[in-house]
Image (spheres, grey):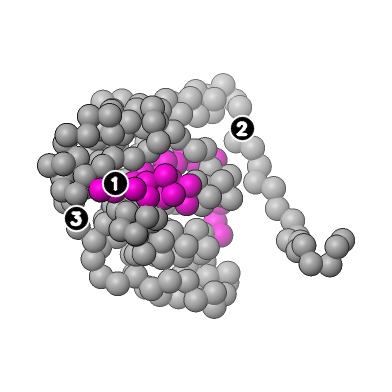
């Protein structure tokens, strides 16, 4: 059983990484493996809506998105972390999330798997980022894991984050809750309770009044 912790900051050991480290503590204590995944500091282009992934099963751009999607097939849960620069999710993380979820047409990746989105900001924008994350999970039939407050830490440097006692406590709560959900899913499977089927069907628009 493993959870992928996605660091969406261009700084590998910055504030976002420090927050994710705190999430990892109760997961490891519960015997759950943690996989650290850094999206890197190289530019990540946004989705081109080219449709390549619908037939190829992967994004047309060969970068961290396809690497992550391969790992996601065997993952049991996810925590996505982003820094905040201008009151919302950082640009490189937004591109990553758009392309990951747009190209993930295999239900084994995300269907009924638990996920949490966390952010770090100096002062504001964390709640906006939290909302952004949850929309990816909500459209993908995922189980959204919350904490003891909004999923955020605050600080301009990792040393600042160390002083955010409530923020770090919230990160530990996310790890504890994630571990519980994973163990509950494990117990449900052992009891013969099946994961709900992902429903599918035609897409409809709101333009023709029908």
Residue occupying the point 15% across, 45% down: 158
- Can residue 122 be found in the magenta stretch? yes
CA distance for labels 1 and 3: 21 Å
Residue occupying the point 47% across, 51% down: 132
Which of disc 3 and disc 1 is earlier in sequence? 3
Tag 2's secondary structure? loop
CB-based contact (under 8 Å), mark 3 and mark 2? no
Is 163 in front, or is 106?
163
Determine whether 124 is above or below 104 in the image: above
CB-based contact (under 8 Å), mark 1 and mark 2? no
Which of disc 2 and disc 1 is earlier in sequence? 1
CA distance for labels 1 and 2: 43 Å
Reading the image, the residue beneath label 2 is 194
Q: Nearer the viewer, mark 1 or mark 3?
A: 1
Tag 3's secondary structure? loop
- Label 3 neighbour load within 10 Å: few <14, some 14-19, many 20+: some
Question: Is residue 80 visible in the rendered structure shown here?
Answer: no
Q: Residue furthest front?
A: 123
Reading the image, the residue beneath label 1 is 123
Q: In the image, which disc is placed on residue 162?
A: none
- Label 2 neighbour load within 10 Å: few <14, some 14-19, many 20+: few
Q: Nearer the viewer, mark 3 or mark 2?
A: 3
Residue 14 location (% of width, % of height): 18, 51
- Can residue 62 be found in the magenta stretch? no
> Magenta span covers which residues?
105-132
Residue 42 location (% of width, % of height): 25, 70
Tag 1's secondary structure? loop
Question: Is residue 90 visible in the rendered structure shown here?
Answer: yes
CA distance for labels 3 and 2: 38 Å
- Label 1 neighbour load within 10 Å: few <14, some 14-19, many 20+: few
Reading the image, the residue beneath label 3 is 12
């Amino acid at each position: 059983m493993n959870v992928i912790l996605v660091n969406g900051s261009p700084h590998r050991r910055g504030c976002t990484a420090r927050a994710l480290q705190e999430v990892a503590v109760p997961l490891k204590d519960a015997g759950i493996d943690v996989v650290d995944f850094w999206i890197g500091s190289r530019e990540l282009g946004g989705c081109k809506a080219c449709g390549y992934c619908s037939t190829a099963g992967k994004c047309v751009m060969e970068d961290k998105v396809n690497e992550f999607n391969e790992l996601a097939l065997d993952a049991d849960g996810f925590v996505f972390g982003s820094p905040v620069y201008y009151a919302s999710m950082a640009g490189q993380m937004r591109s990553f999330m758009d392309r990951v979820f747009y190209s993930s047409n295999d239900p084994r990746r995300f269907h009924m798997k638990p996920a949490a989105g966390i952010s770090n900001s100096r002062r504001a924008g964390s709640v906006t980022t939290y909302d952004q994350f949850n929309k990816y999970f909500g459209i993908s039939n995922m189980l959204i894991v919350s904490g003891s407050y909004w999923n955020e830490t605050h600080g301009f440097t990792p040393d600042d984050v160390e002083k955010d006692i409530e923020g770090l406590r919230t990160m530990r709560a996310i790890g504890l809750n994630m571990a519980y959900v994973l163990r509950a899913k494990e117990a449900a499977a052992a009891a013969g309770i099946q994961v709900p089927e992902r429903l599918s069907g035609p897409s409809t628009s709101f333009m023709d009044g029908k």
